[in-house]
Image (cartoon, helix red, strand yellow):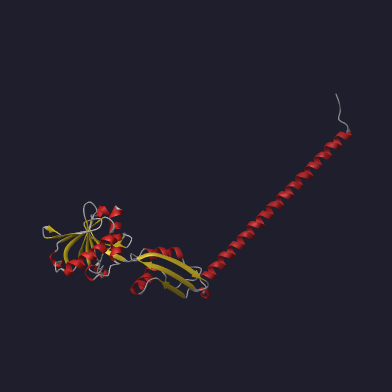
Amino acid sequence: MKRSSVLDKQYVKRSRKKDIVVLKKGLGQLGFGLIKILLFVFGLGVLSAAFISGYQFLSSSPCLALKNIIVTGVNGNLRQELMKVSGITGRETFLSIDLSKIEKNIEGHPWIKSVSLKKEFPDTLYIQAEDEKAVAIVCSDKMYLMDKEGVIFKDFEGDDNIDLPVVTGLSRGDFGNKGYLERVSSLINDMQKVHAPLISIKELSEINVEADGDLSIYFNSLGLKVFVGKQGFSRKINSLRGIIKHLESTHRLYQARKIDLDYDSKGVVAFGDRAA
């Protein structure tokens, strides 16, 4: 049997000592690494706490108090209502003011079409608003207000205090068909360019949407129906102006009962059951 020599034993002892030294060194490096990580996390926490404390201080600092609110695009009572619904309390600072919340509050007002906000350091807030402009009252299951794009934007209420042409012939379900209301708005936009006394936009009292989508219009001072169809309203209104002028000159205007303008280059006037 082979015996181990004294040198072999010394070699084993040296190897073990070397392994222990390496292990101690590795543990030392690991511990040092953990200490560095802990110090980094601690420092990061201190910086975060300092940042939060600083932000809270500045958010409530009177030095950054919101002092100027400049509103453009709306006037009078609507401006006052806009400020009420905005949610601005007067205690806000430049940093604490919540623009998205204010924008949402203002856009919720039925007479506001759009709004944009901008802060200017250190104490100013700009509010640029665009108000809705009604061009007609749509009469259906109840009455609604329509804008120049043919969009229903609010219910008509007694305190709206506006005098506009009334759109008839539509059911509530027809609102989903944009073609009807866009056609009406197109007619109104063309009517706003007319300055003839009897057929101006101020004299327009009713727009009737017939079953097939054709339009007929009525005026306050004329006891007749004017049929304008579905398109070409600008040309037809100019034609109507000439027809009205001719009927006035021949003293037959108030005998007419209907004017049909849905022709390429002329109109047909009906007197009672007759046409001319």
Residue at 83 percent of width and 36 percent of height: 12
Left or right of 245? Residue 106 is right
Residue at 65 percent of width and 57 percent of height: 40
- Counting from the top left corner in percent of width and height, residue 230 is at 26, 55
Furthest-top residue in view?
A: 1
Q: How many marks?
A: 0
Which of the 4 quarters of the picture holds residue 104?
Answer: bottom left
Q: Compare residues 163 and 96 and report the one nearer the observer.
A: 163
Q: Compare residues 36 and 256 and report the one nearer the observer.
A: 256
- Counting from the top left corner in percent of width and height, residue 228 is at 23, 58
- Counting from the top left corner in percent of width and height, residue 224 is at 16, 63
Left or right of 190? Residue 95 is right
Left or right of 165? Residue 68 is right
- On-image quarter of the C terminus: bottom left
Query: In this picture, is 27 found above or below 208?
Result: above
Q: Compare residues 164 and 243 and report the one nearer the observer.
A: 243
- On-image quarter of the N terminus: top right
Furthest-left residue in view?
A: 273
Q: Compare residues 72 and 119 and report the one nearer the observer.
A: 72
Which of the 4 quarters of the picture holds residue 128?
Answer: bottom left
Residue at 60 percent of width and 60 percent of height: 45
